[in-house]
Image (cartoon, rainbow, N blue to C red):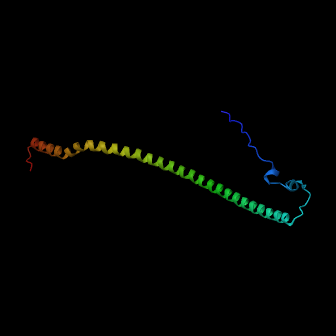
Amino acid sequence: MAEAKRVPQEQPERSESGVDMEGFDQFFSAGPGESQESGSGIYGDTHMRQQVEKLVERFTELMSVSVDQRVETSKIASQLIDNQRQLVATQQILIKLMERSIELTRHITSIEERMPALLEVPRVVESLRQRVAQIEGVEVD
């Protein structure tokens, strides 16, 4: 929605309010080649130059810090990439170890399944020995 146009409040003329802007035109009337008559202008220029030099120096320091931070960020990023590669390699090794563990578990399980039959072997051998002895007619202890 459009805003209503502002109606300027009536302001008394400058001479009526007692605020005159004497010398305002003279301040800007001096051309770029003209020098100012007072000593405060020279002090202002010197002070301005000092401030500009300080600002340029500070800007240079900030740029240097910014470049240093970018270099450091780049180093950290490359280190992060290396760490991620190592992590992937470690995960691949872990996956292979887990696969090998699963194979070993299957093998052990198959051995355990055959174990009861192996435990029965001594009893079967003893039974066969006794039968052979009976057949041959030999006395067994």
The residue lying furthest to the top in this view is 1
- Tell me where residue 59 appears, x and y as whole percent: 72, 58
Does 109 sit left or right of 49 as displayed? left
Asked whether 95 or 122 is in front, the reply is 95
Give percent across and percent down for residue 106: 34, 42
Residue 74 appears left or right of 10: left
Q: Residue at x 41, y 46 (%)?
A: 98
The residue lying at 92 percent from left, 58 percent from top is 34
Q: Residue at x 83, y 62 (%)?
A: 45
73 above or below 113? below
Q: Closer to the camera, 39 or 116?
A: 39
To which quarter of the image does residue 137 belong? Answer: top left
Residue drawn at x 54%, y 52% as measured from the top left: 83
- Which of these two is toward me, 136 or 60? 60
Query: Which percent across, then down, holds residue 141?
Result: 9, 50
Left or right: 75, with 63 as reference point = left
Count of numbered badges drawn on the protein = 0
Near-viewer residue (65 or 110): 65
